[in-house]
Image: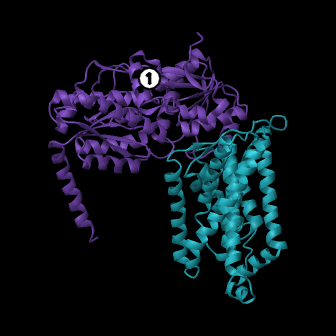
Chain colours: A cyan, B purple
């Protein structure tokens, strides 16, 4: 029983990271029907900017772990969010009306980010400072660190806040209107570009949060870390029903848990085979994902 | 299709020109394929540094045959495909011999390219047995083989650590899987010893808690990880965090200082099976000092073996008295009792180093120290 619960904890931890990246995929898709392949790489960028910030603060003799983490997160999320907006402005906005070209542009953006990190930072991996101990609440035979608890709760909180933003605010209303019909939304006086830019900012900032937390929790980051994580997160978004915010969260946690269970009870070598086989079965039964696509079909 | 013909012509032209270029009066080129990007880039850079140091020293003494030696590096990223491209690039550039390599998954396909081109290839770190079992007369290595390291590791686990329940984790790469299987085979002969877990993790991932949770439930005395340090350091850290019982032991791709940086406090007490590191070899003292003076940091685990490999190649070219690739292969094969900084080196018929040693490193206080057997 302890083993099963421990695997659940492991799965929820990995799943939280997938979910954070998946939210960006789902928001962008929901609004402009674009699979933003750069999403996983924005997660890497977030991790690297966070590391730069931590190093800078360490050079300024800031020692308090919480202050370091808070500033690292805020700066990284803001900078990565702006980078997301910049990518939209440069690589996507001119191509909004050509769905195939914009996809290629997204792949280009992804590779550009990966190899910029490669050239600017390091061709190898970098090591984060370890700020927090591995201690945690006593739960019998199950090992959970406070860090894991924090990652899980804060991720959940961010996702709920995002859900509230989309469903309870004026900006959210504009986003939903845009998802249904861009031209009609424009005629209603919605500043389409500003709303899409806001969407990119939020999605990128959430990925950056995941990136910094990855560095703090696992201790190691590399320029290609976003590739595999992005792929899994994309799967999670599709599984939950792309365009659907609670779906992305659910999808992320499910992919994480299925992976852990596959390793724990079948084999690490077959993990990806098992994981994707299960996902294919779910999608065959529910082609629109577990919670369905929320956006209204155009035409 | 139309572009194919000129492309082929160009390749053929290059292939024709390259060896000719090497025979003229310019510098003699030695090829060094190593990972300069990806998880093992640190190790690759150290190896390249070792090669450059050896060449600088040889050039200071006048070079070979009155010509300077030049190192030409190529990034193989520990990847089979990129390795083949890197190898082809070196061959086309007219290198007279190749010294280097880190990951077996790249070195194996590279050895095929070098064989076809008829260039000597002396590996400094690639330990997969297959490398010298292909019947290629041009392939050598001055490091041990995993079917020697596996039995050594098995003996340490059983005789020194008195382990009965052993978990083995690899990462499905050529090297890691080979070492894992060699260790499992060696353990099969030991009475009362059970390999309770044998599985792989995925390189490039960061979370191995699911695998470790399963291992924890099997209560191992030793976990032997045979992959590379990028994952090894993370795994050691998660091993401690999850309170997995037993000793964390790792193969010789974890003898890199970056492992310790990554694992942090969890590195303490980790054992690593390894070919002797330079700092434990009295004969390598001058080398370490020269390396530090030039690069400002410790020489890494394999650069000393690369340094020897370069010097073996240089000595062979001197003996052959030509830069003809075939003659160099013959001269390298005749290497006997070469006084290297990692010991006396002779190549056997397969191209393997005769009489290799292994040692157990123990990480103490953030450093690799020699582990002294309890019994």
Q: Residue at x 83, y 68 (%)?
A: A164
Question: Is residue A15 something that shows in the picture?
Answer: no
Q: Give x and y (percent) for residue A252.
A: 71, 57
The quarter of the picture where the C terminus of chain B appears is: top right
* Nearer to the camera, B91 or B25: B25
Occupied quadrant, residue A38 = bottom right
Using residue B336 as the reference point, say whether residue B33 is left or right of it: right
Q: Give x and y (percent) for residue A46.
A: 64, 55
Where is B184 relative to B160, above or below?
Answer: below
Q: Residue at x 53, y 57 (%)?
A: A114
Q: Residue at x 52, y 23 (%)?
A: B153
Question: Is residue A39 something that shows in the picture?
Answer: yes
The mark tally for this picture is: 1
Q: Give x and y (percent) for residue A283.
A: 67, 66
Where is A143 relative to A119, above or below?
Answer: above
* Nearer to the camera, A221 or A274: A221
């Amino acid at each position: 029983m302890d083993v099963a619960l421990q695997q659940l904890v492991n799965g929820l931890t990995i799943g939280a990271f997938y979910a954070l990246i998946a939210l960006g995929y789902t928001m962008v898709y929901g609004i402009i029907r674009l699979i933003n392949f750069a999403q996983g790489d924005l997660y890497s960028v977030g991790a690297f900017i966070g590391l730069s910030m931590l190093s800078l603060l360490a050079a300024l003799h800031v020692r308090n772990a919480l202050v370091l983490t808070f500033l690292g997160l805020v700066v990284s999320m803001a900078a990565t969010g702006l980078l997301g907006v910049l990518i939209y402005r440069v690589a996507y906005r001119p191509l909004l009306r050509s769905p195939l070209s914009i996809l290629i542009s997204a792949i280009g953006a992804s590779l550009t980010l990966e190899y910029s990190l490669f050239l600017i930072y390091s061709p190898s991996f970098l090591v984060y400072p370890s700020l927090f101990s591995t201690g945690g609440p006593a739960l019998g035979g199950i090992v959970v660190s406070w860090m894991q608890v924090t990652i899980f709760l804060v991720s959940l909180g961010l996702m709920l806040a995002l859900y509230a933003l989309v469903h309870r605010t004026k900006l959210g209303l504009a986003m939903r209107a845009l998802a249904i019909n861009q031209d009609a939304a424009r005629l209603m006086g919605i500043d389409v570009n500003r709303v899409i830019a806001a969407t990119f900012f939020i999605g990128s900032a959430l990925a950056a949060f995941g990136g910094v937390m990855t560095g703090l929790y696992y201790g190691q980051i590399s320029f290609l870390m976003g590739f595999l994580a992005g792929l899994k997160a994309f799967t999670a978004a599709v599984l939950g029903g792309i365009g659907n915010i609670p779906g992305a969260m659910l999808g992320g946690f499910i992919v994480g848990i299925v992976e852990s269970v596959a390793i724990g009870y079948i084999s690490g070598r077959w993990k990806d085979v098992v994981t994707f086989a299960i996902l294919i079965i779910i999608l065959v039964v529910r082609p629109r994902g577990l919670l369905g696509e929320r956006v209204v079909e155009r035409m | 299709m139309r572009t194919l013909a000129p492309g082929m012509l160009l390749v053929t032209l290059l292939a024709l020109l390259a060896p000719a270029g090497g025979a003229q009066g310019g510098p003699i080129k030695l090829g060094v394929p190593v990972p300069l990007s990806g998880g093992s880039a640190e190790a690759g850079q150290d190896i390249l540094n070792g090669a450059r140091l050896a060449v600088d020293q040889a050039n200071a003494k006048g070079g070979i045959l009155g010509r300077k030696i030049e190192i030409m590096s190529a990034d193989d990223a520990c990847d089979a495909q990129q390795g083949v491209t890197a190898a082809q690039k070196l061959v086309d550039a007219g290198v007279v011999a190749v010294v280097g390599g880190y990951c077996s998954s790249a070195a194996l396909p590279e050895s095929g390219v070098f064989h076809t081109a008829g260039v000597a290839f002396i590996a400094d770190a690639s330990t997969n047995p297959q490398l010298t079992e292909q019947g290629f007369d041009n392939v050598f290595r001055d490091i041990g083989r995993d079917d020697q390291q596996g039995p050594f590791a098995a003996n340490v686990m059983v005789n020194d650590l008195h382990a009965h329940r052993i978990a083995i984790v690899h990462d499905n790469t050529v090297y890691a899987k080979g070492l894992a299987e060699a260790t499992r085979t060696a353990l099969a002969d030991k009475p009362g010893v059970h390999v309770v877990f044998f599985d792989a993790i995925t390189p490039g991932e960061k979370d191995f808690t699911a695998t470790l949770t399963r291992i924890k439930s099997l209560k191992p005395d030793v976990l032997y990880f045979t992959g590379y340090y990028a994952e090894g350091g993370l795994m050691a850290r998660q091993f401690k965090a999850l309170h997995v019982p037993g000793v964390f032991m790792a193969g010789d791709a974890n003898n890199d200082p970056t492992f310790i940086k990554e694992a942090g406090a969890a590195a303490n007490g980790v054992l690593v099976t390894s070919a002797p590191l330079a700092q434990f070899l009295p004969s390598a003292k001058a080398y370490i000092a020269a390396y530090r003076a030039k690069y400002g940091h410790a020489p890494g685990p394999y650069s000393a073996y690369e340094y020897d490999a370069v010097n073996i190649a240089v000595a062979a070219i001197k003996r052959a008295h030509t830069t003809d690739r075939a003659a160099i292969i013959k001269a390298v094969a005749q290497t006997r009792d070469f006084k290297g900084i990692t010991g006396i080196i002779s190549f056997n018929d397969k191209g393997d180093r005769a009489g290799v040693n292994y040692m157990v490193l123990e990480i103490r206080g953030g450093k690799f120290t020699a582990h002294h057997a309890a019994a």
